[in-house]
Structure formats: C-alpha cells, structure tokens
C-alpha cells in the first residue's frame, strides 16, 4: 500500500501546480483505469493515508469524495472505501499500447457491431458534418497575416481610437436593448443605418425591418440553408467560387451544382440548360466574382431574375466587398432590380472595416422575416450587441462613409502600384484578369506550371497569395486545365514598399521553379 500510494502522489510536470487533493484524485483514478488498483480492492483508511503522504486528512477526504461522486470508488458502512466493482471492463487500459492516444478519425455513421476500447473507438460524426468537411478549405487561416492575403484590409488605417470611444459610449449608459437584447433581428439603430447606406450606395430596395444582423456571411448562408434547403435540393454556385460557400450549404444537405463563370460573370445559359436537375437556388456574387473579379452583366442579371421567376427559385446575392470599386461608383445591386422578392442580399463588414468585428447582415424579402426571426431564436439569438451599438454610432456620426472614401483612395493607389509591378516585371509569367475593384488582383500563370506547385516556397517567404485552381469545383479537371492556374494577390493591407519587396520574392520563386 505504501509503495503504491507514494507513487500515485508523485506529480506529473503538468500537474505540479494543482491542489494536493486534485493530484491525489488524478493519481488514484489513473491507477484504477490502468489496472494497478483492481475492482473491489480496499483502499487505505483516510487517517493512515494522510499520515503516510504527510497530508491533512481533509485533503484525503476531498479526493475520496470526488472519486466517489464520479463512481470510481464506493464506501461500505463500517468497512471503509473500495474500488468500485461496477466499472465497465472497457474503461480499463491494461496494455501499454492501449494507453497511447488513438488518432480520431471520421467513420461511417453506421453503428459499430463490436465494442471498442476507450479512446480507440472510431469517432462517429453526422452526415451533415461529413458533407461539410468534404469541402474542407484548402487555405486555412494562418496565425500571422502574411503579404498578399486577399482578404486583409489595412488595419493600421482603421480609426480604432474612435471605435474604442464608441464602445465606451455604448456601455456608459447602456440602452436596455444592449444590456438585455431580445430582438433576434439585431439592434434597430444599426439596421436603420445599414438600410439607409444600402439604399444610397448600392441601390438596394429595403427598409430596416428587412435587415437581420448576423456574425458574418457564413452565418448568413447557414441561416439561408436551414430556412430554404431540404436535403437533396440542388444549389447552383459560381465556378470558380469562394470555398466557404460550398461547405456551409453542403452541411445543410444541398447538392452542389457548379455553373461556369466567364468575362460576363455567371453563365446563365448553363443554368437554364439544367432541365432534369433543377436548382432550388443560385448563390452569386454579381458585383465581383470571387476570385476572378468579373462582374455579372446587365443582360445576365435580367436573365437570372427571369430564371428565378420561371422556376420559382431563390437568388442569394453575396456582396462581399462592393464598396471598393476604383473605376467608378459602386455598382447597383441585383436585389435592386428584383420586383418579385426572389433575391436575398448578404453583406459583411469584415473587409470594409476589420475581420474581428464579426458583423454582417441579411436583407430579406418581407415574407421571410418571421421565418428567419424564428430560426435565429434557436441559434445564437443576437450577435455582439455592444459592437452593434458602436457600429450604429460609427454610421450615424459619419465615420463609416468617411472611412470607405479614404480607403477607396488608399487601396486604389496600392492596386495601381501592384498592377504596374506585374506589367513591368512579370508580364511573361502572369496574365492579369481584368476587374475594377476589390481587395485583390487575380492573375493567370502563363508558364505552364500548376499553381499549387509554388505553395511551400511562397509560404517560406511569408507570402500568402492564393491559388486560382483551388477555387474550382472539379479539382481533378483543374489539374489538367492551364487556364485554371493562377495567383490571387491581395494588396490592401500593406504599404507599397512592402508589396514591392514581397513581389520581388514572388517573382524570384516563379522563375526559379519554372
């Protein structure tokens, strides 16, 4: 007994700062699970154990009480404490190899017919999770933002001092809607400001009651999927298109139907040709396809609305960064042309302000508002009411419009600089895909190489440009198609001198590995 319990109380390095009762509890529990203490074996009396381990009796009692409450030991009146006899056999790890942590792996959702021991049992996940993970992102977020990341605005140019002041103002005398939010549509003041901005700048036909505040475009798409998609429904997506859209809709049971994109945007003719597999909805980025940057022409916008009318379909308009157009004012929205309430409009503040704000919005047809309001009540309720209040004030005090105008000039200058670098130093390697805005430039490789071939070398130089081929639906076809090979380079978040240095590194890598 003395040898066993002296060993039990020897702390592992990661347990050294734990209270004594907790360390004793962990040691006895481990001894039970690995078989050193057998079911039914009597434990020493608390007084004896306290004297032997030089601990207070209360420490021993606290450890025993915790073990007893979790079912590892049991007390018998007049006899003392014993290892529980009712522990299932599969809890015991008697072989050293059984103690090694097994790798968790997804398996078929079909129940297993044979029991599995401890951590070695296969992990069963839902079909929804399996569908979503089948579209796992090729470009996971990096811990440090690197040059040419296409989603990064200039954080140093955002007026965080003003933002901090507005957050303090929101809490100094909080409105009940902030302290105890209840409306799953979001704060009324912010919805009013967003509706006014969208009517003015994007020609969106909406009022505040149609606006729902969400934590970003991904949550907006998830709500759309839960409200409007049944398992097996076909959803048409742009090809190439943003990888995050595919996963969130697939999780809701959608069958993804890619529709090609060309210089005029989504090929609506390819959509209307789908007679035997009619899509329930289309998700499109008419102002600027991601990643190509092409704009849906007016002829095709009208054709898309006609498709929705003829097939009782929905159109989801993802307007992720349309505020930044450099060759003219922002384009009018597709939703503004809709006269039959078939378009749901989605926007986000992650790019126009900063990613950590985690706020976006939906503009819903009136008859869908109660549906989404009800569904939202079963999700997260209301996102970040304090940030909502600060953003409403940011709009009302004129800071939002001022920031967008200032950034449009700054980003436009950086965009022109990067375009000049490509034309002057890499015209034999990169062909620019023409676009008029956004936070990135899309180029096609003209050296015959597969774009992902450069990934490791670029990351070694802290370059995080993205690869055009990874945004196409059919990756097997992508590897064989030269016009799908390209680099997507963000320019907004960095000074021109930084862009120049990293561009030199990028071109060196392209030439060395060609």
Image (cartoon, rainbow, N blue to C red):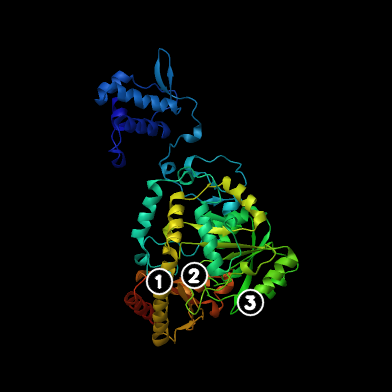
Asked where in the image residue 208 lies, by quadrant, the reply is: bottom right
| Circle 3 residues within 10 Å: few <14, some 14–19, many ≥20 | few
- Label at residue 298: 3
Residue in view at x 52 percent, y 54 percent: 214
Q: In this figure, which residue is indicated by the disc labeled 2?
A: 323
Q: How far apart are marks 3 and 1 (CA)?
A: 29 Å
Residue 333 is drawn in which quadrant? bottom right
Q: Earlier in the sequence, mark 3 or mark 1?
A: 3
Q: Is residue 450 above or below residue 192?
A: below
Residue sitting at 41 percent across and 23 percent down? 41
Q: Which residue occupies 43% across, 71% down? A: 405
Q: In this view, does 129 lie to the left or right of 350?
A: right
Across the whole image, how many numbered discs are drawn on residues? 3
Vertically, is 262 above or below 381?
Answer: below
Residue 337, percent across and down? 64, 70
Q: Which mark is first along the chain, 2 or 1? A: 2
Image quadrant for the N terminus? top left
Residue 131 seen in this snapshot:
no
Measured as percent of width and height from the top left, residue 324 is found at: 47, 72
Q: In which quarter of the image is residue 277?
A: bottom right
State which tag comes first along the sequence, 2 or 3: 3
Q: What element carries label 2?
A: loop
* Disc 2/disc 3 C-alpha distance (Å): 19 Å
**Of helix, strand and loop, which one carries label 3?**
helix
Where's residue 307, x and y in %? Answer: 71, 69
- In the image, which disc is placed on residue 406? 1
What separation in Å lies between label 1 and label 2 (alpha carbons)?
Answer: 12 Å
């Amino acid at each position: 007994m003395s040898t066993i319990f002296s060993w039990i109380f020897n702390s592992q390095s990661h347990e050294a700062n734990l209270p004594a009762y907790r360390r004793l509890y962990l040691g006895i529990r481990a001894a039970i699970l690995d078989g050193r203490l057998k079911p039914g074996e009597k434990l020493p009396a608390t007084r004896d154990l306290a004297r032997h381990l030089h601990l207070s009796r209360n420490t021993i009692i606290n450890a025993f009480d915790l073990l007893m409450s979790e079912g590892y030991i049991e007390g018998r009146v007049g006899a003392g404490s014993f290892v529980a006899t009712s522990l299932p056999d599969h809890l015991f790890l008697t072989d050293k190899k059984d103690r090694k942590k097994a790798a968790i792996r997804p398996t078929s959702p079909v129940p297993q017919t044979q029991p599995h021991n401890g951590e070695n049992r296969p992990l069963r996940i839902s079909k929804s999770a399996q569908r979503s993970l089948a579209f796992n992102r090729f470009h996971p977020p990096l811990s440090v933002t690197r040059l040419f990341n296409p989603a990064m605005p200039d954080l140093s140019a955002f007026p965080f001092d003003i933002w901090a002041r507005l957050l303090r103002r929101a809490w100094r005398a909080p409105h009940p809607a902030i302290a105890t939010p209840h409306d799953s549509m979001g704060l009324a003041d912010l919805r009013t400001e967003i509706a006014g901005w969208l009517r003015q700048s994007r020609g969106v036909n909406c009022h505040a009651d149609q606006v729902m505040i969400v934590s970003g475009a991904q949550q907006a798409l998830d709500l759309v999927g839960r409200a409007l998609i049944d398992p097996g429904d076909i959803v048409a997506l742009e090809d190439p298109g943003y990888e995050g859209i595919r996963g969130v809709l697939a999780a809701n049971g959608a069958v993804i139907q890619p529709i090609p994109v060309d210089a005029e945007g989504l090929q609506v003719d390819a959509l209307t040709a789908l007679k035997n597999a009619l899509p329930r909805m289309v998700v499109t980025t008419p102002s600027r396809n991601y990643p190509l940057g092409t704009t849906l022409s007016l002829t095709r916008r009208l054709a898309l609305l006609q498709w929705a009318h003829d097939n009782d379909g929905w159109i989801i308009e993802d307007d992720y960064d349309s505020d930044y157009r450099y060759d003219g004012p922002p384009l009018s929205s597709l939703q503004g042309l809709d006269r039959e309430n078939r378009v749901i409009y989605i926007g986000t503040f992650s790019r126009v302000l900063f990613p950590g704000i985690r706020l976006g919005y939906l503009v819903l047809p009136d008859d869908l508002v109660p549906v989404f309001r009800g569904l939202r009540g079963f999700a997260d309720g209301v996102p970040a009411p304090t940030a909502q209040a600060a953003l409403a004030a940011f709009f009302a005090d004129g800071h939002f419009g001022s920031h967008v105008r200032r950034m449009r000039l700054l980003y436009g200058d950086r965009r022109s600089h990067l375009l000049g670098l490509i034309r002057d130093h890499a015209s034999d390697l990169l062909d620019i895909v023409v676009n008029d805005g956004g936070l990135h430039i899309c180029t096609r490789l003209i050296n015959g190489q597969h774009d992902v071939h450069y990934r490791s070398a670029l990351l070694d130089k802290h370059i995080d440009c993205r690869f055009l081929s990874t945004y196409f639906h059919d990756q097997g076809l992508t590897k064989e198609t030269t016009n799908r090979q390209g680099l997507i380079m963000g320019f907004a978040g960095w000074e021109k001198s930084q862009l120049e240095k990293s561009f030199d590194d990028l071109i060196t890598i392209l030439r060395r590995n060609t």
